Structure formats: C-alpha cells, structure tokens
Amino acid sequence: MTKGRLEAFSDGVIAIIITIMVLDLHVPREATLAALRPAIPTFLGYILSYVFVGIYWNNHHHLLHASHKVNGTVLWANLHLLFWLSIVPFATGFMGESHFARVTVELYGVVLFMAAIAFTLLVRTLVACNGTDSTIATAIGRDYKGKASLAIYLIAIIFAELHPWVSVALYILVAVIWFVPDRRIERMVAE
C-alpha cells in the first residue's frame, strides 16, 4: 500500500467517526431554548471529541507528510489507532448522555489514553520504517508532548474517581497542548 492510499483510507475512517458522533446529537421536539438544556452535556462532549479527532487527523497528516514510505507494520499500527478513534463516538455519547458521570468520564479517558498509545506506536513504526536519521525521526525527537499527554491522561483517569470535572479539564489541557500542529514536523518538511 502506498503512503497516499493509507492517508486516504485514514481520512475516510476519520470522516465517518465524526459523522457518527454528530448523529448522536438529537434535535429537541420543542422549539424553545429550555428544550436545548438536556442536550448541553451531549453537545459539550461532541465539541471535545470533535476537537480530539480533528487533532489526530491533523497530526496524522503531518506524520505521513514527513514520512517517505510505509510498510506492513505501519499499516497495522495505523489500524490500531483508527480502532481506538472509532470508539470515541461511543465513549462520547455515553459520557454526554450520563451528564459526565464518574465512570463515563473514566471510560472516555481510557479511550483517549489508548488512542494516544496507538498514536505513539504509529510514530515509532513510522520512524523505524523510515530510519533513525529520517525527517520524521528528527522532527519527533524525544516526543515530550506525547509523553506528557500520556501522563496527563493517566492522572485524569485517576482523578475521575473523585472529581470528573477535573478530569475533563485535564482532557482539555491535552487538547490545548496538541491543538497547534506539531511545528517540529512542519519545520523539518519545509526544509
């Protein structure tokens, strides 16, 4: 499989994931602002998940742009990432429908944590495939953002037991860290 085909497949899967998430937003039966109130938690969960999936899509694009080739290991690592991202709509809906109940915020964190692990594995397989002196290897460096994100997710999952909204704030913190695409990759590709 070529790098372009892998990227096109991933883009399609991610587009479907976003579509599935938006289908969980139900239109109220009444045309009043009060009728929107019960949908607020689901909508907030959707916004958070939309941002996360968008961040993965954006950074996935940059990773593949910095890579010159892919192999079978990369394909499996990519499918692993897409698997965890495909569970995001379920975790989002569960969390929103329960109004951010403790166990649902924990589950959401576990899904985000596993997606982050899968992304880390994808990065490592791309570096291994392209070589330790490749553009992608140089751009990734020690991957402090990735390591920090994993640590924050673990802390958030633990905090969800007592303070689910602290966990949600930590999830938002990770999104803020990653919101701007990885400049290291952009600089290396531009050179």
Image (cartoon, rainbow, N blue to C red):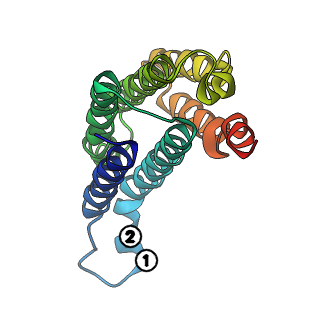
| SS for dot 1 | helix
Q: Which residue is mark 2?
A: 36
Position of 133 compared to 41: left or right? right
Going by the numbered disc 1, the residue's amino acid type is Leu
| SS for dot 2 | helix
Q: Residues within 10 Å of mark 2 (few under 14, many from 20)?
A: some
Q: Along the line of sight, which residue is nearer the eye, 98 or 189?
A: 189
Q: Which residue is mark 1?
A: 33
Position of 185 compared to 20: left or right? right
Q: Residues within 10 Å of mark 1 (few under 14, many from 20)?
A: few
Q: State the image coordinates of residue 1 (x, y, percent, origin top left).
A: 28, 39
- In the rendered image of this protein, does residue 71 appear above or below residue 54? above
Screen quadrant of the C terminus: top right
Q: State the image coordinates of residue 16 (x, y, percent, origin top left).
A: 27, 56
Q: Residue furthest bottom?
A: 31
* Gap between marks 1 and 2 measured at Cα: 5 Å
